[in-house]
Image: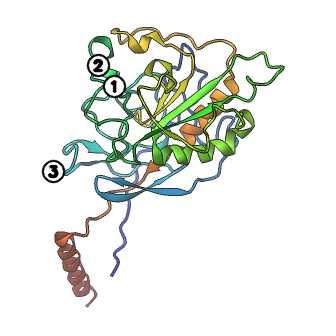
Amino acid sequence: MRFPFITRRAEEPQESHRRYRRKGGGGKGSGKGASGGSTGSSSRGSSSSVTIAGSSRSATSYGSGGGKASTIPSGQIFAGRIEGGGTRDQVFGSSTYGSGYPGITGRGVAGRGFPFLFWPIVWGGAAGIGSTAYLHDTEYGSPDNTSRPGGPLMTSVFVSSASTSSNSTLSPTTFHILADNTTLISLISAITTNCSSNINTSSSSSNTSNPSPYNASDPNAPQPESAIGYYRASSVVLTLNGYNNSAALSSDENATNTPLPTGIDTTLEDCLNQTIGAAVPLIDGARSINTGVGSVALLSMLFVVLQRLVV
């Protein structure tokens, strides 16, 4: 017998974000809902299944997120931390690692909860020291950690078609997206729909249809100083090749971001930014029920109670 469960959503609507043109390499509060901006797509994406703390969950592109936040139970990884509750209008962060957490400021991801259930990306390499220590926290494992919700970290390359045109006045513009495997595959589908006219799919550098594992030691891989935007509690990052933001490597949390290079393809940048914000998969609802012995006994008891109420 199957018992339906009701999912509670956030009881108070969040204030809608507006998208502002980034200044100084990605400012705070960038973002607009799925119906706004230049993406031109209001269709809902298909759902994909990921594994969260041992239970199957459905993550939906263009979904609203939300659901009741809960505490991770004892005996599970990151027990005692809060997970869930993050909504679509809380997805956008800034160019700072550790941004995109609803109601939390400051850089770094150490000891934090999981408002969107996905873990933050990790930059790999040895544990950092000094000003870069916050970029190399080891508590979430290595980039190829298969326990990560959505799978290991993968990266995809998006080369601007405008900047590679023979008569273009734009500088060569190449972006990377780094995220877990499930999220990246979903985003590629949305980006292909929204931004395909701005992407040079024939470029030998592009791998939009075939993401590659993130290798921190690869000099061509995304780097923390090239990040221009973090999303969904820093579990997704958009980077720009050739951008070197000294603030990311500074010991001063209030350091001013290095301006983005001039002459880049801002049309593709804007499309990627808005599509990630609108389409990055979010998970709704409470945990899936565990079908262990204890849960089966509980369901049997509920069935007896319901029978008596009916009689």
Q: Are the residues at dot 2 and dot 1 in contact (C-beta closer than 8 Å)?
A: yes
Q: Position of residue 218 (x, y in %)?
A: 46, 26
Mark 3 nearby-residue class (10 Å; few <14, some 14–19, many ≥20): few
Q: Number of numbered discs present?
A: 3
Identify residue type, mark 1.
Gly
Q: Nearer the viewer, residue 188 or 22?
A: 188
Q: Which mark is residue 125?
A: 1
Q: Are the residues at dot 2 and dot 3 in contact (C-beta closer than 8 Å)?
A: no
Q: Nearer the viewer, residue 174 or 217?
A: 217
Q: Position of residue 171 (x, y in %)?
A: 70, 16
Q: Which mark is residue 74?
A: 3
Identify residue type, mark 2.
Gly
Q: Name the front one of labels 2 and 1.
A: 1
Compared to residue 10, the image places residue 14 above or below, namely: above
Q: Secondary structure at mark 2?
A: loop
User: Which one is earlier in the sequence, the residue at label 2 or at label 3?
Assistant: 3
